[in-house]
Image: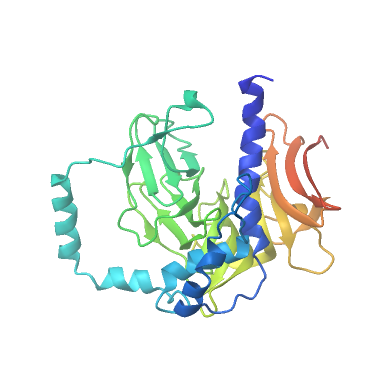
Amino acid sequence: MNKQKLKPLFLVLLGLLVILPSVEAFGRKDRKISRKKAEKNSKKFYPKPSQGDPNERFREDPSERAKWFLFQRTYPFDSIPVEARRKALASIPKNVIKTQQQSSQRWNLIGPAPTSSFPFPNWGLTSGRINAIAVSPSDPQTVLVGASTGGIWRSTDAGNSFVPTSDDQVDLAVGALAFSKSDPSIVYSGMGDIDNNYFGTGVLKSTDTGRSWTRVSNSSLPTNGQASQILVDPSDPNRVYLAQFARLDSTSNTRFASGFFLSTNGGVDWVRTLPGLPRDLVADTADPNTLYLGMIRVDMPNMPPGVYRSTDKGATWRVFLPLSFSFAVDVRIAVTPADSRVLYAFVGGVTQNSFNISVMVTRD
């Protein structure tokens, strides 16, 4: 088997290794972690291989790993204070921030340098993860990318060069980006990285094609959340759809499933119309009323994981492709632009103690 055939398999396995530990911890009631408890259990978080067995790998508990990751950012508190970073940023005089930005131009970058890809050297230099890419519908030279923890970057030369445009925002974990087709000057960004527990503070909006950003979502949308996808109604720039994968309860430092949210006033107010763990969201290319949502869990009675369809712009949902997994891991969807009746679904999950991956298609 040549390297070209191995690449898709490697990517699938790599993605599942990242997603599975994150999903496994949802719904558990984590107890508060004290400093003494964390220090006492340091060996549990970072166990050593057994003596005499050089092939044994490091054992780990994904849920404990997630709690330890959060603990390091909450100490000396038992939970992350609500809006703490935003309040801290707001307390800094603007002239101080401006001076810091100007003085940073006198510094020269000396490292760290990008790394070369280990599995596939022909990938060239690799540095960090990109969660989102959005191209302006009116100007293909304007490209926005969202980094997992590096903010939003903008290019006006079709991706040959980029400049950061969201460094004045309090959180830089970008989950999704979407231009408005009816008004390409408007762009929305769903904040929060679902893969490594970097939570965002809601939804950012730009009215100048991504040159500057403002947080617009209010308390109707969980402020500590992780966005998996965001879309804008093709005929209404104020109607926004958000798939928020998870939220963090600041009082208990516990992660909970979130769901699908709908805004009709430009991302300010939000209503959740389907609770659970949404992994993907796509729109029908021919019918703007129809949306498809990939759910790895639905927190409603008798509603299995799978693909859900809405024919009323996200107001209500019905199962379109039910999955029989006892534990679903991923549900991704793609609508064929040339024929919206053709849909593909990439699904993965556990059935009878075995892991299964499938690509499914419907033409009706």
Horizontal side of 35 relative to 360 (left or right) equals: left
In which quadrant is the N terminus drawn? Answer: top right
Quarter of the image where the C terminus is located: top right
Which residue occupies the foreground of this view, 20 or 225? 20
* Residue 239 visible to an observer of this rendering: no
Residue 96, given in percent of the width and then of the height, sits at 16, 64
The answer to whether residue 289 is left or right of residue 165 is right
Front-most of residues 290 and 29: 29
Q: Residue furthest top?
A: 2
Res 342 visible: yes
Residue, x 69% and y 38% (percent of image)? 335
Front residue of this view, candidates 35 and 263? 35
- Asked if 356 appears above or below 138 in the picture, the reply is below
Considering only vertical position in the picture, is 124 above or below 331? Answer: above
Residue 342 in the image: state x and y as whole percent: 76, 34
Q: How many marks?
A: 0
- Residue ID at (54%, 59%): 226
Check the image and name the residue furthest to the front: 52
Residue at left offset 56%, top offset 60%? 47
In the rendered image, residue 341, in percent from the top left (x then y), is placed at 77, 36
Quadrant for residue 84, please give it: bottom left
Task: Check the image and report above or below for 125 versus 263.
Answer: above
Q: Is residue 188 above or below residue 337?
A: below
Q: Position of residue 74 (x, y in %)?
A: 43, 72
19 to the left or right of 71: right
